[in-house]
Amino acid sequence: MTKRKLLPAILAGMGVMSAPLAMASMGNIGTTYGVLPSDVASAQALSLFNGQVSATYYNPANLARDARGALTTGLMHAEHELRASKVRGGSFASPRDGDVLQDAPSQQMLLGMKTDLTNLTQYEHPLYLGFMLGVEKYGEEMMAFSSATDRAGQYMEFGRQPLFLNLGGGTQIWRGLDMGLSARITLHSEAELVASSTLDGVTSYETLNVSAVPSIRPIFGMNMDFGESFCADQDECWMNGLEAAFSFRGYSNSSTKVDSTITIPNTVLDPGMSLAVSTIDSYQPNIYAAGLSWRRERWRVGVTLEMQQWSELESELERDTIKDQAVNATGADRLQFKDIVVPRVGGEFHLNDTYMLTAGVALSESPMSSNGSLEVNYFDNDKLIVGLGLTAEYKTIPLLAFPVRFDLAYQYQQLESREFDLYDQRSPNYPQSYETVEADGDVSVLSGSLTLKF
């Protein structure tokens, strides 16, 4: 008979709590940083018009911009220094060691491909398929998942990210008008543990069942080139180079649900003691994005507005058995969210036929409208985001028939200072806060990729 301690058995069944340094969050690389270097560099201002494989996430219509296939591989490293300094607090103050609260990096390996599927059909109408994959810890960690309450406080949107996967297609609907549809794929895991235990936690007769199913959420995009649509027969037209784009990205999350039933002979009899845990992570709200781009021979500028519906996260957290008390609280310790609009402005400039510079800036307001969240103690800040990138596209390479593209980008995010009150029901001061902290920080992102055309 195999015997195990009760706590390790339950945690093995949960599959939720990775190492504390993982610090997974309510975010993903696409909304928090940018998928490919071109997105990172423009602060996502030009992502609606980006014809690379990251279009499967931002605007799948752009998969139809270039008839050639593409294979992209890359790496992204995001370095965080997220701080929380004590402003005031009593004897129940949190066990914080210094001001730096979180500095674990996010390290993504990126892989994407786009190809023309026209030859698979009986029609000559072009149809393009693309996928984009991101795996944490440079490809070693697919389920960076941590869900917890925290007396010291925790940042809501930064940290390691679980598997990032998008699959979609795009095609031309009319002259100058492209449309596309793709899917954001996340994992929803379930575990069931049945065991008998002694009072000191040694289990026997264990049964463990674990399953994971994909959750598929839609992404729709469209792009119109006004010059191609209305001025195709004119050499000189004021609409040449003018583009408009729209996309909708449906909400998504990663989730884990655990049900365990434990019996203790002569103490807790059949049907036993039940422990149920349900929690979500890596939440992305519904996002509506619209943008305009104006292109000339050597430069392009663009502006994008995103409306993010974070208010829906409150109802999601009501079903989270780890964080639900924060949204069910009735006082100043109630966690509340609001919808936000994120403006993004970016541009590209071709230095010559080979090299191009990309830059962008964005202002992202915090979707957290509350300054306290009972026992969860989330922090989130307004952010100033600035990006800069360099692209080199070599038209001729020995042994290769098509161009090769190299991208390198850097992004800096400054988190504006904001005060938060920390709450815990175990505090002798509750329902008053036991500590007030000032949260701020800096995030540096470095990303590089190689794209082969075929």
Image: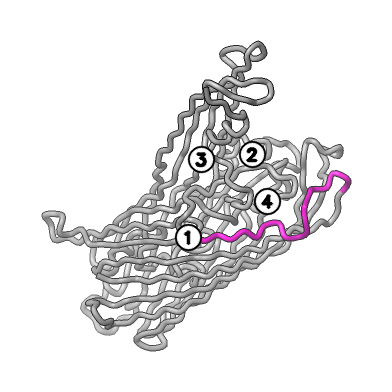
Mark closer to the chain start, 3 or 1: 1
- Tell me the mark number nearer the camera, choosing from 1 and 2: 1
The residue tagged with tag 2: helix, strand or loop? loop
Q: Are marks 4 and 2 in contact (CB under 8 Å)?
A: no
Q: CA distance from mark 1 to mark 4?
A: 24 Å
Residue 272, percent across and down?
59, 16
- How many residues crowd mark 2 within 10 Å: few (<14), some (14–19), many (20+)? many
Q: Earlier in the sequence, mark 3 or mark 4?
A: 4
Residue type, label 2: Lys
Q: Quadrant of residue 233?
A: bottom left
Query: Where is residue 406 drawn, in percent x and y?
Result: 39, 76
Alpha-carbon distance for marks 3 and 4? Answer: 19 Å
Instruction: Give, as a three-letter code, the residue at label 4.
Output: Gln
Which mark is first along the chain, 4 or 1?
1
Q: Which residue is mark 4?
A: 154
Q: Which mark is residue 323?
A: 2
Q: Earlier in the sequence, mark 4 or mark 2?
A: 4
Q: Which quadrant, please, contains the C terminus? A: bottom left
Q: As rendered, which of 306 and 446 lies closer to the eye? A: 446
- For label 4, the crowd category at 10 Å Cα-Cα, with few meaning under 14, some 14 to 19 and many 20 or more, is many
Residue occupying the point 49% across, 72% down: 41
Q: What span is colored magenta in the figure?
A: 90-108
Say above or below: 32 vs 390: above
**Amino acid type, residue under disc 1 in the picture:** Tyr
Numbered badge on residue 255: 3
Label 3 amino acid? Ser
Q: Earlier in the sequence, mark 1 or mark 2?
A: 1
Question: What is the secondary structure assignment of the residue under circle 1?
Answer: helix
* Element type where label 3 sits in the image: strand
Residue 138 is labelled as 1
